[in-house]
Image (cartoon, rainbow, N blue to C red):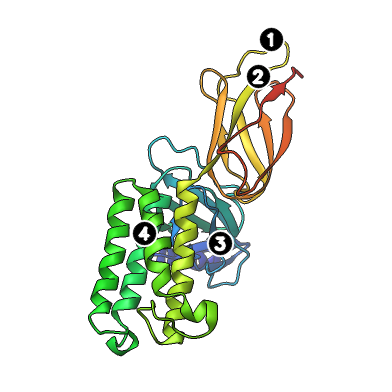
């Protein structure tokens, strides 16, 4: 009787201590340490790019096996994004709208939930990404010793050249930005890349520095080209029996550069997968109470801007 009374008093004392969880096995009381969730995500994210969510930094003081629960606790208006496997330690989602996504991770050690680990992910449009790249390149150029330029004043003039590109991107004049880059800036930094030595047109006369700027400018050129000539796969998802469009059918990229991306059809049964990079895509259309249909599309730099692919779904 005294032992039982002592155990009961011990339970009361331990329950009064803040932040302690108890597990009771027979007449024994085992203190359980609350696990700690730690959600991580990397680098700048742009629309329709796969985001990897990593929870393996989560810990438990007792070394218990952890169970994971990911949720998109806040998404931009109109977004249809979903986490692919919300119970995995490492999982993904594809943001379909620009804006801020709030992701919450909670882990459980079999006894108690952790507190939430919350991360906010800023998702940018391709246009915003280009502007950030230009500004990053400008910051790089601003740190150079003026002696790497043919004339010291060229450093400031070179920065101004990139300001013009930013202004063109901001007002949607992407072809002007591309023309400025390819016909004005590249000729001033391409001597070392083409002949191994600076040429008479080069503004940067140090080959090591020139090559680093040339590589960054090439990346910028690719990004602007992607905006100037974006590719779209579009078409109808129709009912096989009536040939009418199906409202809110889903078209999913099941393999390809944007694997996991999902769009819904409008009230006419039309879907659009926009801003697609080159690559091979396997698409699947699904709708309630109907058999799925799939197709394969390959996009290259020579593909038409709009690629038409229709789906026909039969009743189950």
* Residue 91 pos. (x, y %): 59, 55
Which quarter of the image is occupied by the C terminus?
top right
- Foreground tag (3 vs 2): 2
Q: Secondary structure under badge 1? A: loop
| CB atoms of marks 1 and 4 within 8 Å | no
| CB atoms of marks 4 and 2 within 8 Å | no
Residue found at x 48% / y 86%: 197
Q: Earlier in the sequence, mark 3 or mark 4?
A: 3
* Residue 259 pos. (x, y %): 63, 48
Q: CA distance from mark 3 to mark 1?
A: 61 Å
Say which residue label 2 marks. 238
**Horizontal arrangement in the rendering, residue 153 relative to residue 255 (left or right):** left
Say which residue label 1 marks. 242
180 or 64: nearer the viewer: 180
| CB atoms of marks 3 and 1 within 8 Å | no
Q: Earlier in the sequence, mark 1 or mark 4?
A: 4
Label disc, if present, on residue 5 of the rendered structure: none
Q: CA distance from mark 3 to mark 4?
A: 69 Å
**Badge 4: few (under 14), some or many (20 or more) residues near its Cα, within 10 Å?**
some
**Badge 2: few (under 14), some or many (20 or more) residues near its Cα, within 10 Å?**
many
* Residue 254 pos. (x, y %): 68, 43
| CB atoms of marks 2 and 1 within 8 Å | yes
Q: Earlier in the sequence, mark 4 or mark 2?
A: 4
Total labels drawn: 4
Position of 195 relative to 220 (above/below): below
Q: CA distance from mark 3 to mark 2?
A: 56 Å
| CB atoms of marks 3 and 4 within 8 Å | no
Q: Secondary structure under badge 3? A: strand
**Horizontal arrangement in the rendering, residue 131 relative to residue 220 (left or right):** left
Q: CA distance from mark 1 to mark 4?
A: 52 Å
Say which residue label 4 marks. 180
Q: CA distance from mark 2 to mark 1?
A: 8 Å
């Amino acid at each position: 009787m005294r032992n039982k009374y002592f155990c009961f008093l011990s339970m009361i004392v331990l329950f009064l201590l803040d932040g302690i969880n108890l597990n009771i096995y027979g007449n024994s009381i085992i203190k359980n340490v609350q696990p700690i969730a730690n959600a991580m995500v990397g680098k700048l994210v742009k629309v329709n790019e796969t985001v990897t969510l990593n929870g393996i930094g989560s810990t438990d003081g007792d070394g218990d096996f952890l169970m994971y629960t990911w949720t998109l606790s806040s998404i931009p208006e109109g977004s249809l994004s979903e986490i692919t496997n919300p119970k995995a330690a490492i999982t993904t989602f594809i943001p379909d709208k620009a804006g801020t996504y709030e992701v919450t991770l909670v882990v459980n050690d079999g006894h108690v939930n952790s507190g939430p680990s919350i991360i906010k992910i800023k998702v940018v449009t391709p246009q915003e990404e280009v502007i950030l790249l230009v500004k990053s390149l400008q910051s790089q150029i601003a740190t150079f010793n003026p002696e790497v330029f043919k004339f010291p004043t060229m450093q400031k003039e070179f920065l101004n050249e990139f300001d013009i590109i930013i202004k063109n991107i901001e007002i949607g004049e992407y072809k002007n930005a591309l023309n400025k880059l390819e016909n004005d800036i590249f000729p001033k930094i391409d001597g070392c890349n083409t002949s191994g030595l600076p040429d008479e047109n080069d503004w940067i006369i140090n080959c090591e520095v020139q090559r680093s700027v040339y590589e960054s400018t090439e990346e910028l050129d690719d990004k602007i080209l992607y905006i100037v000539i974006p590719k779209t796969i579009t078409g109808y998802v129709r009912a096989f029996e009536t040939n009418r469009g199906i409202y809110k059918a889903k078209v999913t990229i099941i393999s390809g550069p944007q694997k996991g991306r999902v769009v819904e059809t409008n009230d006419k049964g039309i879907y659009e997968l926009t801003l697609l990079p080159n690559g091979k895509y396997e698409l699947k259309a699904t709708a309630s109470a109907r058999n799925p249909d799939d197709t394969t599309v390959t996009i290259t730099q020579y593909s038409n801007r709009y690629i038409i692919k229709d789906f026909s779904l039969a009743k189950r």
